[in-house]
Amino acid sequence: AASAKIIDGKMVAKEIRDEITTEVSRMKDAIGVVPGEDSAETEVLKFISDFNDDPAVHGILVQLPLPKHMNEQNILNAVSIEKDVDGFHPLNIGRLAMRGREPSFVPCTPKGCIELLHRYGFQIKGKKAVVIGRSNIVGMPAALLLQREDATVTIVHSRTQNPEQIVKEADIVISAVGQPDMVRGTWLKPGAVVIDVGINPVEDATCPRGYRLVGDVCYEEARKVVSAITPVPGGVGPMTIAMLLSNTLSSAKRIHNFQ
Ligand code: NDP
């Protein structure tokens, strides 16, 4: 059987990081500004408000989940949408969902998935796409992004009946479930493109740490069926960090009016 093309997120992420390094030095040399990424853990709202007002801060990340005594909504709402490099502010998500609106930032992991499709030249427009998972940080924004790119999008979640039949229709599959090897080779349409976001530890006594990481998609089965697939690790994971750097650079450019 033909072997699937490997979508190498590690390589593309390296390319993007190199491009960002070049842009950052260009910006530093030209106007003496380096994009900043600081965040804080205590007195969160006060820090956020100070960071919002500080032109030297270009991106604010709230590391989720928050401790139980903190209100996630209040804290996410406090981040200036112009510095919301995670793209989690409800206004940015709302704009992402609406036609004719542009979010200031798009969440990094789903943006990384779309970036991999773009950089590998896979057409999205007009394709049938299935997103497995509907979390606020991955599945839902991934589905919104695919729709913005003119795919026809179906979302599969834990209450979906016959997920394998729905996934089998997809030209593009983005899986963000958190279940090791859930998507079997038989679920996939021959020639499909698979972006596997899942990062799942499974016990493996032969590994030094006692476990290894696998995706949501059974890689060995899938690669014999599909035309392209991201490995885990080394697929989507490195893209998340690269997209965060990219969002922070955009923010710094916008704040300092640097083209
Ligand atoms: P969540 O647990 O927040 O969401 C999981 C989603 O999968 C939910 O929408 C849930 O449905 C759905 N789901 C659960 N079980 C099934 C099932 N049996 N069939 C169909 N759908 C199911 O996870 P995240 O979105 O935060 O993360 C998903 C995976 O991606 C994890 O493995 C995580 O480690 C990885 N991840 C990787 C990142 C990276 O590469 N940088 C970044 C973020 C996450 P329902 O809504 O009905 O409960």
Image (tube, rainbow, N blue to C red):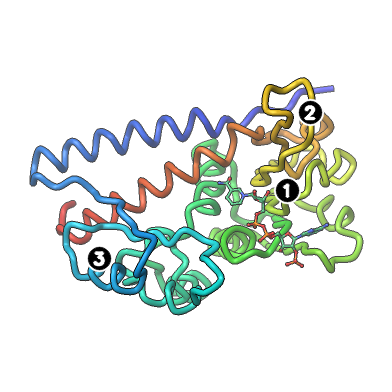
Residue beneath disc 2: 204
- Counting from the top left corner in percent of width and height, residue 78 is at 36, 76
- Counting from the top left corner in percent of width and height, residue 70 is at 49, 74
| Cα–Cα gap, marks 2 and 1 | 33 Å
Q: What's under tag 3, amino acid-wise? A: Phe
Mark 2 close to ligand 1, CB under 8 Å: no
| Cα–Cα gap, marks 2 and 3 | 44 Å
> Which class describes the residues within 10 Å of circle 1: few (<14), some (14-19), or many (20+)?
many
Q: Nearer the viewer, residue 35 or 62?
A: 62
- Image side of residue 57 versus residue 19, left or right: left
Q: What's under tag 1, amino acid-wise? A: Asp
- Image side of residue 78 versus residue 115, left or right: left
Q: Is residue 88 above or below residue 200?
A: below
| Cα–Cα gap, marks 1 and 3 | 43 Å
- Numbered circle sitting on residue 171: 1
Query: Can you tell which quarter of the image residue 45 is in?
Result: bottom left
- Counting from the top left corner in percent of width and height, residue 121 is at 54, 38
Q: What's under tag 2, amino acid-wise? A: Asp
| Residue at position x 69%, y 48% in the image | 172
| Residue at position x 18%, y 65% in the image | 54
